[in-house]
Amino acid sequence: MLEVDGVDLYYGASHALRRVSLAAKTGEVTCVLGRNGVGKTSLLRAIFGLQPIRAGQIRWNGKAIAGLPPHERARAGLALVPQGREIFPRLSVRENLETGFAILPRRLRHIPDEIFELFPVLKDMLGRRGGDLSGGQQQQLAIARALVMRPGLLILDEPTEGIQPSIIKDIGRVIAHLAARGDMAILLVEQYFDFARDLAAAYVVLERGEVVLSGRAGEMDETAVRSYLTV
């Protein structure tokens, strides 16, 4: 389980996260919701060690990781699907997937068959450059690249952004399948409420760097949550 406990994060004098706490349990999808600029990406930067925290603690499976560099957090089982996908456009699909080998022992440096069961379109495009894929295909590639790392915690930063509805449905089915396997915690950062609601077991809403709503999905006040997502 991922535990974020009372985290403060600053950019210079700007207080980006204020005593933020959440938990993401194995076998569940935990959704972080909020408008642009409320601290969602700052939270992910804190979790992955891309920005130092000023106060609080971050634990993965009971171990404090706030002092670890990003590559050690990846070795510990954290994987990120970044906003905007950030695949390597000049590398082939196969080469993009193989970048996930970097943190793995040699015996695991192969692409699992499950990747192509989840994303069959990628199997037919292994030799194509990543930059030649559509936006939806690139998003599937970015998720597959993270899964190659065999993560225990998968974090997805707005995977529906700029994606056609049919691919959004496919991505939703993949996320639900991964959660149902029961061996992975999933933290989903989203603005698209309906997508998040259908997947979430628990949710956290951020506003101005603070948690303003949180709880189990079955107890969610949808009107209250939506009020923090509308412009």
Image (cartoon, rainbow, N blue to C red):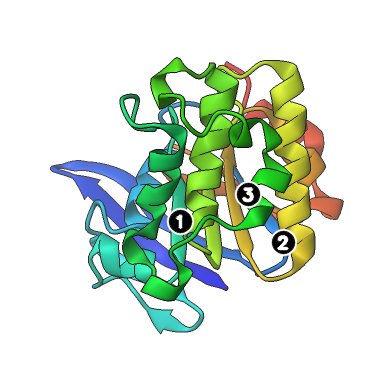
Residue 18 appears in view: yes
The earlier-in-sequence mark between 2 and 1 is 2
As displayed, is residue 153 above or below residue 82?
Answer: below
The image quarter in which residue 84 lies: top left
At horizontal 37% and vertical 72% (from top left) the residue drawn is 106
Residue 38 position within the rendered picture, expressed as x and y whole percent measured from the top left: 44, 34
| Residue 79, numbered circle | 1
Identified at 78% across, 41% down, the residue is 173
- Separation of marks 2 and 3 at Cα, in angstroms: 20 Å
Residue type at the position of mark 1: Ala
Q: Nearer the viewer, residue 158 or 144?
A: 144
Q: Where 2 sits versus 8, above or below?
A: below
Determine whether 228 is above or below 1 in the image. above
* Residue located at (86% from left, 53% from top): 218
Q: Which residue is mark 3?
A: 115
Q: Amino acid at mark 3?
A: Ile
Q: SS of the residue at dot 2?
A: loop
